[in-house]
Amino acid sequence: MKTPSNVSASIVTRNMSEFAAETGNVYESIAVISKRANQLAVKLKEELNGKLAEFATTVDNLEEVFENREQIEISKHYERLPKPTNLAIEEFLEGKVYYRTPSEEEVTGNVAKAE
């Protein structure tokens, strides 16, 4: 997964009105950001597990487990990456996140068909 270089790995103070600008509602924006952060977290975890699977051993004996320098470097690399929440916030503020909400007409139309 390509990580943008302009995303800070540390805490940044945010202006809440920037979040509301896109959707008109801060809480809706936070919901969109949280769903995107979950998607990014799953993708990063799958990527990391795929890379670490190469080093997996089938031996359960503790004496035979050894430190693999490449495995440690891969883990450190992923620890230094910006958190998925920070990536999702930046994507949202830059307008790179696509989201949709069902309109109330569609919701009431589906209820009427169910009766």
Image (cartoon, grey):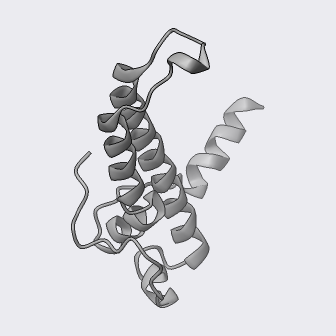
Residue 55, percent from left and from top: 38, 22
Residue sitting nearer the eye, 57 or 13 = 57
The quarter of the rendered structure image containing the C terminus is top right
Residue nearest the viewer, comparing 95 with 91 = 91
Residue at screen point 51% across, 55% down: 101
**Which quarter shows the N terminus?**
top left
Q: Position of residue 60 (x, y in %)?
A: 60, 13
Q: Nearer the viewer, residue 59 or 113?
A: 59
The relative height of residue 6 versus residue 36 in the rendered view (above or below) is below
Q: Which residue is painted at 39% across and 36% down in the image?
A: 48
> Which residue is nearer to you in this view: 77 or 31?
77
Q: Position of residue 89 (x, y in %)?
A: 42, 69
Q: Is residue 62 left or right of residue 24?
A: right
From the viewer's perspective, is residue 2 above or below residue 88? above
Q: Residue furthest right?
A: 115
Q: Where is residue 102 shown, x and y percent of the image?
A: 53, 52
Count of numbered circles on the image = 0
- The quadrant in which residue 91 appears is bottom left
Q: Residue at x 44, y 61 (%)?
A: 83
